[in-house]
Amino acid sequence: MEMEFIRNRITELRLKKGVSEYQLSYDLGHSKNYIHNIVTGYSQPSVKELLYLIDTLGITPRLFFDEEAEYRNPILVQEIINGIKSMNDQDLEAVLLMVRRLNEKN
């Protein structure tokens, strides 16, 4: 996996979340140029910092590194996953039926 993918992914997810580079840097506890320096290739985050950044974006590392997920919004996917975790079996079956029905249209 190339750093270019990571830089592009950070930018993509940051924009989908509606957060500026400055705000994301601030949320991570760094200077205002921290994210800008990463996405421009001037610096690279440590593994620990990258995992913290991914968590701050609200997704799992798996969704972050899923190259096939580029056509989806991983932040929304994560919100859906978090929402269904507390559902009972009847509600999960209803959600599954809705997902199947929506996928039939595609």
Image: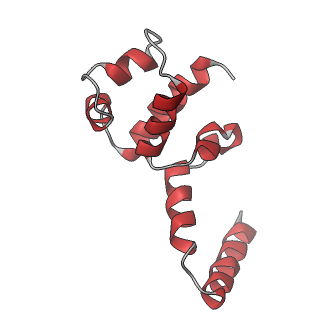
Residue that appears at 43% across and 18% down: 38
> Considering only vertical position in the picture, is 90 above or below 43?
below
> Considering only vertical position in the picture, is 33 above or below 54?
above
Residue that appears at 52% across and 65% down: 82
Residue lying furthest top: 42
> Does residue 22 appear left or right of residue 37 in this picture?
left
> Does residue 84 appear left or right of residue 67 in this picture?
left
> Considering only vertical position in the picture, is 72 above or below 52?
below
Q: Quadrant of residue 3?
A: top right
Residue that appears at 45% across and 38% down: 52
Residue lying furthest front: 48
103 or 16: nearer the eye?
A: 16
Q: Is residue 69 visible?
A: yes
Colouring rule applied to residues: secondary structure
40 or 88: nearer the eye?
A: 88
Q: Position of residue 101 (x, y in %)?
A: 70, 76
Q: Is residue 71 visible?
A: no
Q: How many marks?
A: 0
Q: Position of residue 13 (x, y in %)?
A: 47, 39
Q: Position of residue 94 (x, y in %)?
A: 64, 85
Q: Position of residue 9 (x, y in %)?
A: 53, 32
Q: Quadrant of the N terminus?
A: top right
Q: Quadrant of the C terminus?
A: bottom right
